[in-house]
Image: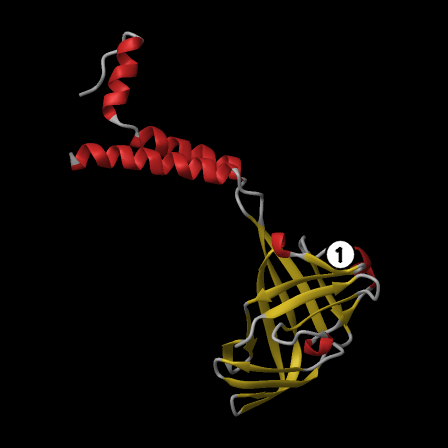
């Protein structure tokens, strides 16, 4: 009884997977990076004019219109890598924004419920049409307008001097739901009850494999 039931369960589970995948919208993962050189401290370890890179992971389906001309994507995980000190994870989630009106892109601390959480603001004229949902850059400008002060898993982080700043976004496409569903249909076929296969084969004059 258990062996026969298992094949039916697998078939139903695989079919449910196909139905679920077919109903999903297309998404794309995106990585935003903000990099430069800075002077500051990480958990008691100082650094001076050290290259660093902030990496933020997101999903383009989460981008929203904060107000006309301002796009953001919120509640994202972020890390910072500092030359000579390694990688630290931000304790609080962050947001990424692009103010198309002012042509400025940046990120900040999502635990702040207002605009006081901004860490970074980088200006560039082409940002007037950037929607945060595609690969972009890298673009390098003379300086960022903000400093970084944040808790991390390695202690408090401060980056008080930021040299030439670089922003880049890279999209990694997620397979189309239809492609994943097609693969899952193969699982449905493999997981089908053998008795059902025998019945269908008999109707078309084929011998079922025992």
Q: Quarter of the image holding residue 114?
A: bottom right
Task: In the displayed orientation, state which residue is furthest to the top.
Answer: 205
Is 4 placed left or right of 110 in the picture?
left
Image point (43%, 35%), residue name: 183
Give the position of the N terminus as an image quadrant: top left
The residue lying toward the viewer, choosing from 158 and 25, is 25
| Residue 34, image x, y percentages | 65, 70
Is there any visible trace of residue 119 in the rendered image? no
Is there any visible trace of residue 34 in the rendered image? yes
Q: Is residue 46 above or below residue 210?
A: below
Image point (38%, 31%), residue name: 186
Identify the secondary structure beneath mark 1.
loop
Q: Is residue 187 above or below residue 208?
A: below
Is 50 placed left or right of 196 in the picture?
right
Image point (46%, 35%), residue name: 19
Label 1 environment density (alpha carbons within 10 Å; few <14, some 14–19, many ≥20): some
Q: Which residue is mark 1?
A: 130
| Residue 125, image x, y percentages | 83, 62
């Amino acid at each position: 009884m258990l062996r026969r039931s298992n094949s039916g369960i697998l078939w139903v589970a695989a079919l449910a997977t196909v139905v679920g995948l077919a109903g999903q919208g297309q998404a794309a993962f995106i990585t935003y990076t903000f990099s430069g050189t800075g002077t500051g401290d990480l958990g008691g370890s100082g650094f001076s004019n050290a290259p660093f890179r902030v990496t933020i992971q997101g999903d383009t389906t989460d981008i929203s219109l904060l107000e006309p001309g301002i796009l953001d994507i919120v509640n994202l995980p972020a890390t910072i890598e500092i030359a000579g000190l390694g990688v630290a994870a931000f304790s609080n989630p962050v947001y990424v924004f692009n103010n198309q009106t002012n042509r400025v892109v940046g990120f900040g601390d999502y635990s702040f419920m207002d605009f006081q959480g901004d860490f970074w603001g980088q200006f560039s004229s082409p940002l007037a049409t950037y929607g945060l949902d595609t690969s972009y850059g890298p673009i390098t400008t003379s300086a960022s307008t903000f400093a970084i002060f944040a808790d991390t898993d390695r202690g408090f982080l401060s980056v008080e001097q930021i040299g030439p700043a670089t922003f880049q976004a890279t999209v990694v496409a997620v397979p189309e739901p239809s492609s994943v569903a097609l693969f899952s249909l193969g699982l449905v076929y493999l997981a089908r009850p053998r008795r059902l296969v025998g019945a269908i084969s008999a109707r078309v004059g084929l011998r079922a494999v025992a």
